[in-house]
Amino acid sequence: MKIFLTGGNGDLGQMLCTSLIGMGHTPVIFDIAVPQHPPNRTDRPGIPGIPVAEFIEGSILNREQLRAALKDIDIVVHIAAWHGIHEFRKEKTVYDFWDLNVGGTFNVFQCAIENDIKDIIFISSTSIDERYGVYGHSKILGEEVASAYAHRHGMNVITLRPRAFIPPWNKSVYSNFIEWCEWFSKGAVHISDVSQAVLKSVDLLASKNHDLQNAPAFLTVDGAYQYSDEDLKNWDVDGPGSTFKRHYAQFYDLAVGLGLNTTLKPKKLDITETQRLLNYKPLYSMKTMLLELKKYGPAGPYQDRPL
Ligand SMILES: NC(=O)c1ccc[n+]([C@@H]2O[C@H](COP(=O)([O-])OP(=O)(O)OC[C@H]3O[C@@H](n4cnc5c(N)ncnc54)[C@H](O)[C@@H]3O)[C@@H](O)[C@H]2O)c1
């Protein structure tokens, strides 16, 4: 199938491309930025019979470009947006957020329906909880557009709400792996699990075996945890760091030695509906992180990643 990825050259899009190709799909990257390290491109056609990614340089703000690019597409994954980090760092204005996240999302849904495309995965965010923030508000309005198009046109829409997932190899945000681990310890989802949720959404839409028509899904995407709800309720009752120590005794000295805060109580989100509808099973947990830390040290496991 041809899977159209708006903002496909970003962190999530790049990860999805590789997996989609592996699944036999043809990802079509639609982005204002040209990929530096595309998995495969039309100018490097690869092996006959093996699907490759296509790249179309274009903006979702340009309706003509977008409409033309959406020809012969089966499923759209709408990723392109300015997000939390751009608001936090004041890199984008309220106008930028409105134009891309609200207007751009409207363009994607409208141009999709003009091309008879009914299947869309919309990447929203748990930041919808910050309804008066610039980013949160823009995602609420994006979800509103998605919902209206699902009901008005009988589209099959899966709205995924991941919590923050900027990957450790994104050096513009995390200068080293320890910084990323500090952030991850607060409760988070790894980008590979967000990718898993998108791929399972693609599978569900492709199967046509669902009840999504006129009933769009809104699904929270969180990571995996060793901590039970009971652990979180009785956090550190036996002293600071005791809950961490009970689960990760073998990593305790390493974590303390590297300056990680073992008393941090992570916030765990309810993903019951995501598990039910998509059979989503997050794999990356604090334990995975600690294993990587032990094996690779502060430099982290992603040294060779071409980003
Ligand atoms: N990264 C996170 O922590 C996080 C958390 C929750 C939700 N999200 C959501 O995930 C999605 C993106 O995640 P990411 O981490 O891959 O972001 P990213 O910033 O790495 O990628 C976004 C891509 O969108 C492209 N883009 C910008 N303007 C465009 C336009 N006009 N037309 C086409 N493409 C354009 C950019 O060039 C970039 O490649 C967004 O919808 C964001 O709101 C992100």
Image (cartoon, rainbow, N blue to C red):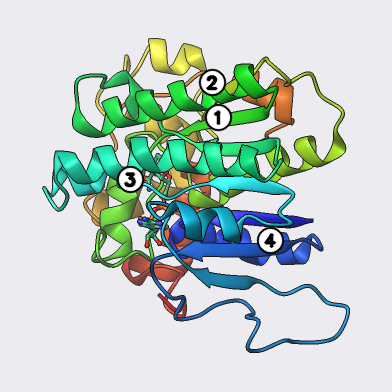
**Up/down of 140 relative to 9, above or below:** above
Q: Which of marks 1 and 4 is nearer the N terminus?
A: 4
Identify the mark at residue 19; answer none if there is no mark. 4
Q: Is mark 4 on a helix, strand or loop?
A: helix
Residue type indicated by callout 4: Ser
Residue 283 in view here: no
**Disc 2 or 3, which lies upstream in sequence?**
3
Q: Mark 1 to mark 4: distance in Å?
A: 20 Å
What secondary structure is found at the residue carrying circle 2? Answer: helix
The kind of residue on which mark 3 rests is: Leu
- Quarter of the image holding residue 176? bottom left
In the displayed structure, 228 sits above or below 293; it is above
Mark 1 = which residue? 159
116 up-or-down from 44: above or below = above
Q: Which disc, if any, is residue 267?
A: none
Residue behind mark 2? 147
